[in-house]
Amino acid sequence: MGILNVTPDSFSGDGLLEVDELVNRAREMVRDGADVLDVGGESTAYWRPGYQPVPAGEELRRVLPVLERLRAELPGTPISIDTRKPEVAREAVAAGAIWLNDVEGVWDDGSMAEIAAKHGLAFVIMHNRHGSEYRDLVAEVRDELLEAAARAEAHGVPKEHIILDPGLGFGKTGEHNLELLRRLPELTGLGYPVLVGPSRKRFLGRLLGTAEQDRVEGTAAAAAIAIAGGAAAVRVHDVRPIARVVQVADAIVRG
Ligand code: HH2
């Protein structure tokens, strides 16, 4: 999954607001091996102190022109909308998105699941938590993901449309992220495909002492371990190198 951030403030420094540049980046990602493109109009930095939230209208002004161009110019590539707002999800679907990626999916009250059910979308439920206190990290992440999946199914999302994501960096310390990657088989064995998003994240920067744009090798290590741990997909900024890493890791592990 290639990341297309239509934002001025994404943590990784890759955000763009210019539609032509985003479409060119999307083409390149598809050429380099991305199977899905994830378009987001609000940085998940929204939980940081002092962050100015992006109203739905502004988020839509950012993402709709990109979605429309991608639908016209890359018709064979599934497009995902990365949003936590139902009103954005609805319009994004009308503009061609067929995946719904909700970083607050684990807290969904049914509004997102109903949109996913009504339109037959793939629904990514990401784990998230305020604070990073756990008694038993992997068990709690697993149980909260399974509860959210059951709620989505109760709202009509077919089981085979649900994808789970441990939410690296969301209510997790660096150590938590490493443990989730190390113990990923405990999540990938639950009967749902698992998506993992390690790309350029701070836990890699802490280990390597490098800035966001200099974390591709760290992302590669995490992506290979995720694939070896049974992940079905990884969400990344640097598609060209990581698609190659994933291809080889997959061939080694799955034959
Ligand atoms: N991480 C980010 C955003 N969305 N979605 C899923 N399913 N999994 C993730 O790990 C995930 C996500 C944060 O990364 P990015 O989009 O690069 O940054 P920002 O939110 O600052 O734009």
Image (cartoon, helix red, strand yellow):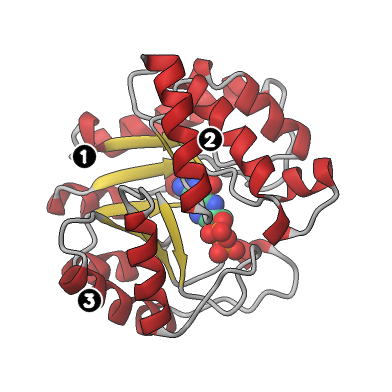
Tell me the residue at 41%/69% (across/down). Answer: 25
Query: Circle 2 sits on which residue?
Result: 166
Q: Earlier in the sequence, mark 2 or mark 3?
A: 3
Q: Is residue 228 above or below residue 66?
A: above
Amino acid, disc 1: Val
In whole angstroms, how far apart are the C-alphas of marks 1 and 2? 19 Å
Closer to the camera in the image, 140 or 66: 66
Residue 29 location, quadrant: bottom left
Residue 106 is situated, as x and y percent measured from the top left of the image, at 46, 42
Query: Circle 1 sits on which residue?
Result: 157
In whole angstroms, how far apart are the C-alphas of marks 2 and 3? 30 Å
In whole angstroms, how far apart are the C-alphas of marks 3 and 1? 25 Å
Nearest-to-viewer mark from 2 and 3: 3
Amino acid, disc 2: Pro
Q: Earlier in the sequence, mark 3 or mark 1?
A: 3
Disc 3: CA contacts within 10 A as few (<14), some (14-19) or many (>=20):
some
Tell me the residue at 44%/85% (across/down). Answer: 18
Query: Circle 3 sits on which residue?
Result: 68
**Left or right position of 63 against 225:** left
Residue 205 is situated, as x and y percent measured from the top left of the image, at 78, 49
Residue 235 is situated, as x and y percent measured from the top left of the image, at 47, 47
- Assess whether mark 3 and mark 2 are in contact (beta carbons under 8 angstroms): no
Tell me the residue at 55%/41% (across/down). Answer: 167
Tell me the residue at 35%/79% (across/down). Answer: 60
Amino acid, disc 3: Glu
Q: Is residue 1 above or below residue 92?
A: above
Q: In what quadrant of the picture does the C terminus appear? A: top left
- Assess whether mark 2 and mark 1 are in contact (beta carbons under 8 angstroms): no
Nearest-to-viewer mark from 3 and 1: 3
**Left or right position of 110 against 75:** right
Nearest-to-viewer mark from 1 and 2: 2
Disc 1: CA contacts within 10 A as few (<14), some (14-19) or many (>=20):
many
